[in-house]
Image (spheres, rainbow, N blue to C red):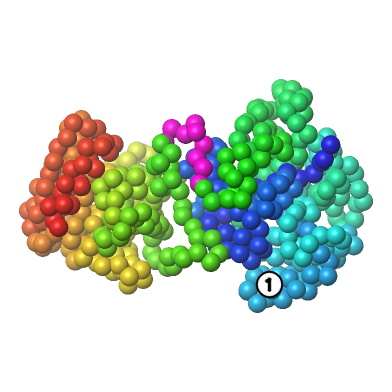
Amino acid sequence: MTTGIHHLTAITRNVQANVDFYAGFLGLNLVKRTGGFEDALQLHLFYGDATGAPGSLVTFLDWEDGAPGRVGHGQVLEMSFAIAPDSIGDWLGRALNAHVPVEGPERAFGAPVLRLRDPDGIIVKLTGVPGATATPTRLSGATLLSADPEATAAFAIRLGYRRGPEAEGAIRLISDSDTLDIRNGRGFVEGIAGTGTFDHIALRAPGDAALRALRDELTGTQPVMVHDRTYFRSLYARDPAGVLFEYATDGPGFAVDEAPESLGQTLFVPGDSFVPAEEIRLMLPRFALPGEPRRPRRDLPFVHRFLDPEAADDGQVLLTLHGSGGSEADLFPLGRQIAPEATLLGLRGRATEEGNLRWYRRTLTGGLPTGFDQDDIRSEARAFAAFLADAPRAYGLDPGKITLLGHSNGASFAAATLLLDPQAVRRAILLRPIDVLETPPEADLSGTEVLIVSGTQDVWRDRTARLADQLGAHGASVTHRAIAAGHAPVPEDARIARDWLATLG
């Protein structure tokens, strides 16, 4: 049987920079793009050789603009690709010209090595291996940092490795095709998952019988399940030192749902997601392969994401503001229903409570929310107004064609911004908003068009009506529709908003 690494999985915070490095700079093939198997709303990219063969694969989960992790024991420390030894100098020059952080060349276990860092800071080694090609096409190994290196080594040996030399502070394990270096991490901090870290290492299983045998062997020591990942079957287990291993079959392979000559061109979504596949495709981050046209990425006060229309662009922009606990892409499916020819621009709120994203903080009494932080609302509204001023210049948008689309917390924040900075934007669609400003300023909203949709079963419906009266009293042209709904958006919201936009021309 063939043993060794099946794939390595890491976490990135910038999918476009990730694609530019691995498909562009390193020249790997993007062989599959999917929604995550554990979370379909998380983009998962697979890079490897032309066929996506086990042993060539590195995969990335996209936590777009997510928090950095901490590298420490219990994690993969670095990965290595095999290249021809006489190409080390060429890669050094290429890295310097591309401003890719690089160290070396040096020698490790007798082989020449360059250490690169990808855009997330992950260490990527290029190791000179006799018989390898000048460009990376297969993994030559990985380094694990373990607080109990002997236990980690013993676990990997159970999965097909054999013990090799011990040198340079590492236990080297050898398979049929690569090596694992187990470094002593005792005394180092424990690793924390996040962007810029590895999630796990997957080793090759000879077949389903081996998966079942390992599952039976480990049952009772930890939860172990065999998963069907469409392109392979696998199980996950932690070694005694906490390193997460996956044990994965070679087949059926990436051509099971895509022609071999067009691998990686189609976005696939796992079939068991509770969110419809067409909505997931709208919400997952977009990127351009090397050489494809792309929209520039600007550094502005809020994390943001574009979704361009599939039909002809009419210049209209729906700027979406999610509800509590949402994300910048949450309202993309609704926005596409409302305005199929508009560009969607989703923003991410900057306040957090118990891990949930919001647009402003709440005030707490005895640990319970009792109101809204007025200073935070005003501060964030100023930052949002600055975004609304800068984004048209940065991306070539027409300010007069921007319409806010907010739900719940985002809609309430949009309404507060209208009152605090009447010149920021002139059109807004607000779904289930409430009045959050305790002392609204004397704003002149004449010329501002606002659609408010409330739910007759929504517990906040009275405050939604109060907000509609408040905006109208300040001069806004307010259309208030009440529908048979609760707090969550429903299809009727899209129809009402679409018809309202049509009346504005």
- Is the residue 426 above or below the residue 62 in the image? below
The foreground one among 46 and 159 is: 46
> For the point 15% across and 49% down, which residue is it?
500
> For the point 30% across and 67% down, which residue is it?
397
Task: Choose top left, top right, bottom left or bottom right for residue 381.
Answer: bottom left
User: Number of numbered discs present?
Assistant: 1
Q: Residues within 10 Å of mark 1 (few under 14, many from 20)?
A: some
Q: Is residue 244 toward the left or the right of residue 418 in the image?
A: right
Q: Quadrant of the C terminus?
A: bottom left
Is residue 198 in view from this perspective? no
Is residue 103 in view from this perspective? yes
- Is the residue 331 above or below the residue 90 in the image? above
The foreground one among 415 and 88 is: 88
Residue lying furthest right: 165
> For the point 66% across and 40% down, which residue is it?
253
Q: Position of residue 148 (x, y in %)?
A: 80, 43
| Magenta portion: prevailing SS class | loop
Q: Is residue 182 toward the left or the right of residue 443 in the image?
A: right
> For the point 44% across and 45% down, which residue is it?
281
Q: Is residue 202 toward the left or the right of residue 429 in the image?
A: right
Task: Choose top left, top right, bottom left or bottom right for residue 3.
Answer: top right
Q: Quadrant of the N terminus?
A: top right
| Residue picked out by circle 1 | 95
Q: Is residue 331 toward the left or the right of residue 38 in the image?
A: left
Q: Is residue 271 magenta?
A: yes
**Residue type, label 1:** Ala
Q: Secondary structure at mark 1?
A: helix
Q: Is residue 503 magenta?
A: no
What is the span of residues highlighted in magenta in the rendered image?
267-275
